[in-house]
Amino acid sequence: MKIVFIGTVEFSHKALEKIIDLNYDVVGVCTKQKSSFNSDFKDLSSICENNSIDYKYIQDINSSDNISWIKNLNPDVIFCFGWSSLIKKELLGLAPMGVIGFHPAELPYNRGRHPLIWALALGLKRSASTFFFMKEGADDGDILSQEIFEITLKDDAKSLYTKVIKIALTQIETFLPKLEMKTFTRMKQDDTKANYWRKRGQKDGLIDFRMSSASIYNLIRALSKPYVGAHLEYKNKNISIWNSEIIDFEDKNIESGKILEIKNKHITIKTYDGAIKLLEHEFNTLPSVGDYL
């Protein structure tokens, strides 16, 4: 079974390593030399060079030149794990088994952009690692493999990313022989249950202390490293916030955003329904108790 692999993030690197370690025939890799928007960007060229695998740096995966390059490799299946642009019809139909994609959400629920970030920001208690046969729509193809996982209150972007990778690599080890032996099954998605998460922008990472403590906590952990970080506005500057803790505070007569305490560089701030302590932040000069954020 000849595999062409497309990817350019940390998960792509781990998945490609896994497939190679399992002695499957990767005949070509499409990756990127740099990325301006993938916080977890990974150039896959080094692993290709170490394993004598042909690779190509790609910008437009659907260009005629790139389609020709992939077609000449004569793949049986194409894996697209960690690529931010849609795969168009010509490429989708190029390999006999099609293109298999990956989406860390419980499809058909939560199709679309930034699935791990949205799951944490919305306070979801579970999600899934899903491999599926790609179609022209976004994340709407038949499911090949899906594993549910728990999201705990202690999870942040890094821990959840690590959890998903571990689960996904186990799935890859399970479904690869089924693909090779043609014993895999396809589960159709119920489109009536589908929703689509939108692309996030900078304003989605802005902390507003009129929000509940839980909402602020979820936003901060959702955007923690390797992502860009949640932020607040202070003296016309954006200050990144990386870690926080919810604090019980029952005085209803204090306005949201007022700084209640600063101790050991930890800043406790009144929220709509309590308080939150900023444990890791990028204030160069600390504000003062009584200031408003």
Image (cartoon, rainbow, N blue to C red):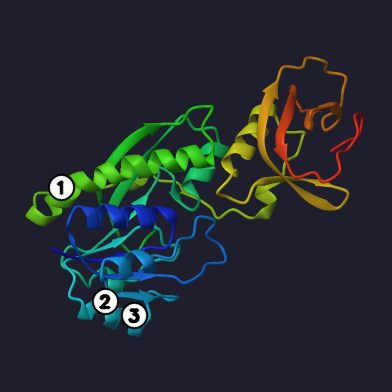
Q: Position of residue 7 (x, y in %)?
A: 38, 63
- Whether residue 140 appears in this view of the structure is no
Q: Does dot 1 land on a helix, a strand or a loop?
A: loop
Residue closest to the eye, 247 or 33: 33
Q: Position of residue 52 (x, y in %)?
A: 25, 71
Look at the numbered discs 2 and 3 and tell me whether their residues touch, using CB distance below 8 Å: yes
Within 10 Å of disc 1 (Cα), the crowding (few <14, some 14-19, many 20+) is few
Left or right: 20 as drawn, with respect to 106: left
Residue type at the position of mark 1: Thr
Residue picked out by circle 1: 185
Residue picked out by circle 2: 70
Q: Comparing marks 1 and 3, which lies closer to the viewer?
A: 3
Within 10 Å of disc 2 (Cα), the crowding (few <14, some 14-19, many 20+) is many
Q: Position of residue 6 (x, y in %)?
A: 34, 65
Q: Does dot 2 land on a helix, a strand or a loop?
A: helix
Left or right: 288 as drawn, with respect to 130: right
| Residue 39 position (above or below residue 195) | below
Residue closest to the eye, 235 or 131: 235
Residue type at the position of mark 2: Ile
Residue closest to the eye, 253 or 191: 253
Residue picked out by circle 3: 66
